[in-house]
Image (cartoon, rainbow, N blue to C red):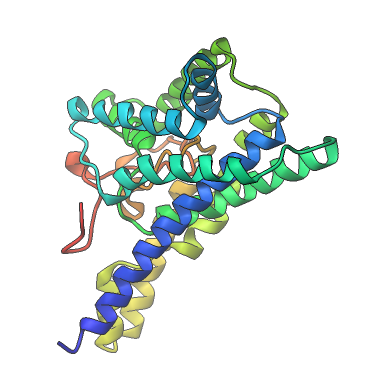
Amino acid sequence: MGRTGPVDWYWTRRLVQLYAGLALYGFSMALMLRAGLGLDPWDVFHQGLQERTPLSFGMVTAVVGAAVLLLWWPLRQMPGLGTVSNVVVIGVAVDASLRVLPEAEGLAWQVVFMLASVVLNAVAGGAYIGARLGPGPRDGLMTGLVRRTGRSVRLVRTGIEVAVLAVGFALGGSVGIGTVVYALGIGPLVQVFLPLFTVPERAAKAAVAGGDEAGTRAAGVGTTAGVADVGAAGGAGGAGGATAAPTDASANAPADGAGGTADGLGAPSRSKSPEPEGAAA
């Protein structure tokens, strides 16, 4: 009974952070679209598909996310609450944002929109990844392939993103300076924001309740370090590719893996994102 309040707050923070981060991620994608200076690889693919279908950009994002999620089955990946939410919320958020955001008029506003998009995308990625409620579909695909093939994160990530970029460009997706700025900027920015938003493990929370401040600080540092190491892995693949498990990711990725995304944290053994006891999946 006495722990009900703290546990409720713990889960409230994680859920609010997850959904706020996903909504902000969708908004940041809409900003990049309105900037008109090029998109990240996955969004180039989404836009190319949108050009060939009657679906909205958000609907295409959701459909692709669901299709990628089906590929988890042969890779024995296990989705979490954040995985399913990623598919739905980002698609809704980007369409809602596109309805209210005007086109950027003039190069100056285009640059402002583009830079704001990259920064907000990193903040959003740090928030929903830090909630630790499951990897996004696209990065779950990446970590599953890394585990099954034995290849490095860098190689697998690059292969996936080059493929979707090429197909998206062939379908009419927008490639430009925004594509380059996003690729170069998102990794370092996520490395900054991810430790700030990472929710500590419940073990660390229990240590606080028991007065073991030194143990709590040690646990917190370990968690943050693991998150930062993976967050440093590099450029994000749009549409919220991933909220995977911070603490176990670096242990599961090959040592030279450095091509992750804002959503790109690895999953542990059996590909199930590590959840504190009682976590929703």
Q: Is residue 217 left or right of residue 107?
A: left
Q: What residue lies at 32% left-to-right and 36% top-to-bottom? A: 140
Q: Residue 188, how many percent across, how many down? A: 59, 47
Please, is residue 228 above or below residue 41 in the view?
A: below
Residue 223 located left or right of residue 192: left
Q: Residue at x 20, y 57 (%)?
A: 280
The residue closer to the viewer here, 166 or 48, is 48
In this rendering, the count of numbered labels is 0
Residue 42 versus residue 242 in the image, above or below: above
- Front residue of 6 and 161: 6
**Left or right relative to 152: residue 4:** left
The single residue placed furthest to the top in the displayed view is 170
- Is residue 254 among what the camera can see? no
Q: Answer with the quarter of the image where residue 51 lies.
A: top right
Q: Quadrant of residue 200?
A: bottom left
> What residue is shown at x 59% (from left), y 42% (from top)?
99
Query: Against 275, is 230 above or below?
Result: above
